Amino acid sequence: MTELLVTKGANIKQLDKQGLSVLHIAANKGSIDLCKYFISLGFDINAKDLNGKTPIHYATQCHAAENLLEYLLSEGADVNSQDNDNQTPLHYSAQVNNSDVAQLLLQNGANIEAKDKTGKTALAIAAELNLVEIAEFLISHGANINTQDNDNKTPLHYIAEMECSCVAQLRFPLGANLEAKDNAGKILIRYSTIALKAIWIELLIQHGANIEAKDNTGKTALCLAAKHSSFKIVEILISYGANVNTQDIDNNTPLHYAVNYPDIRKVQLLIQHGANVNAKDSTGKTPLQCAIKNNQRLMIQLLRENGAIDES
């Protein structure tokens, strides 16, 4: 049918509103026969549409892409072609979680460390999307786990902040920088604490993460857990030796944070492990004064029973 249209004078060189040629469309459909035909007619294999995508970008997203990709690459398709967001076909293979396509691209010279406009590599995208299979594949093929994007986040930052517990399936990469901070001064263990992932927190600690590392506000993981997380996470951190009297830049201790929330077990646990019930923040407030201000009656009683002095 296509050949018939051509012989009848159809203008197949015309682009659509997105700048797509018939070659782009054929690649998107995964049709190797049509791609061969249009290339034989002289279509540019590296032509870009209005979004900067070449036929190989579209072929990478196609589920039955391997034979088509092999053909396009053999005909001179640029394996490192970047779209308007600077994403390469390897970035696209990460998005669709296709390690077979990624392997084919790498075998043909794809740059595993290529970054898009946000500074993300294919591995960072896989981590951000919680795609374990492609993430493990990329790591096993030499992707740098410590590469930072424009926000100074490494792939592990994205893994740590994901709420889905299946990130723990990812075998912990050797050489990972567990002290890396993003532009906001956030550390890996902070992301895990906020995301409520006990398994990941234990993995980080067991692989050498500094439990006393502080973010740009001076908070350790225990400070954050006392404020945001479950009792279980507070319990884990203390079991690994977290300092219960650590202070942030405002001199708040974990106890200052814990007394403002209903879970009295956190406060009990902190006190049992030596939390100073009379510690003062930079304004002179004690945990008891914080509890009184927030009308936390059970906290007030518990603190007084454990020696808190009311200086108000």
Image (cartoon, grey):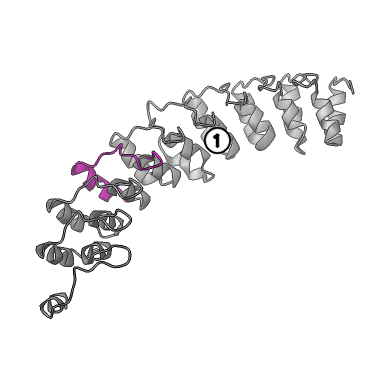
Against 11, residue 32 (above or below) is above
Against 10, residue 13 (above or below) is above
Decide if residue 277 is on the left or right side of residue 116. Answer: right
The quarter of the rendered structure image containing the C terminus is: top right
Which residue is rendered at x = 70% and y = 26% of the image? 254
The quarter of the rendered structure image containing the N terminus is: bottom left
Decide if residue 226 is on the left or right side of residue 129. Answer: right
Looking at the picture, which amino acid does disc 1 mark?
Answer: Ser
Q: Main secondary structure of the magenta part?
A: loop
Instruction: Return the x and y of residue 156 as percentages of the image width and height.
Output: 45, 35
Which residue is rendered at x = 32% and y = 66% of the image? 17
Dividing the picture into quarters, in which one does residue 28 lie?
A: bottom left
Total of numbered circles in the picture? 1
Against 282, residue 97 (above or below) is below
Nearer to us in this view, 68 or 4:
4
Dividing the picture into quarters, in which one does residue 136 lie?
A: top left
Tell me if mark 1 has few (under 14), some (14-19) or many (20+) residues whose alpha carbon lies within 10 angstroms of its own. Answer: many
Which residue is rendered at x = 60% and y = 28% of the image? 221
Where does the magenta region start and end?
98-120
Nearer to us in this view, 245 or 120:
120
Indicate yes or no whether the magenta region holds residue 76: no
Q: Is residue 234 visible?
A: no
Instruction: Return the x and y of residue 161 as percentages of the image width and height.
Output: 52, 39
Instruction: Return the x and y of residue 95 as percentages of the image width and height.
Output: 37, 50
Q: Which residue is mark 1?
A: 192
Instruction: Tell me the SS state at disc 1.
Output: helix
Q: Is residue 283 visible?
A: yes
Against 184, residue 127 (above or below) is below
Instruction: Return the x and y of residue 267 as percentages of the image width and height.
Output: 75, 29
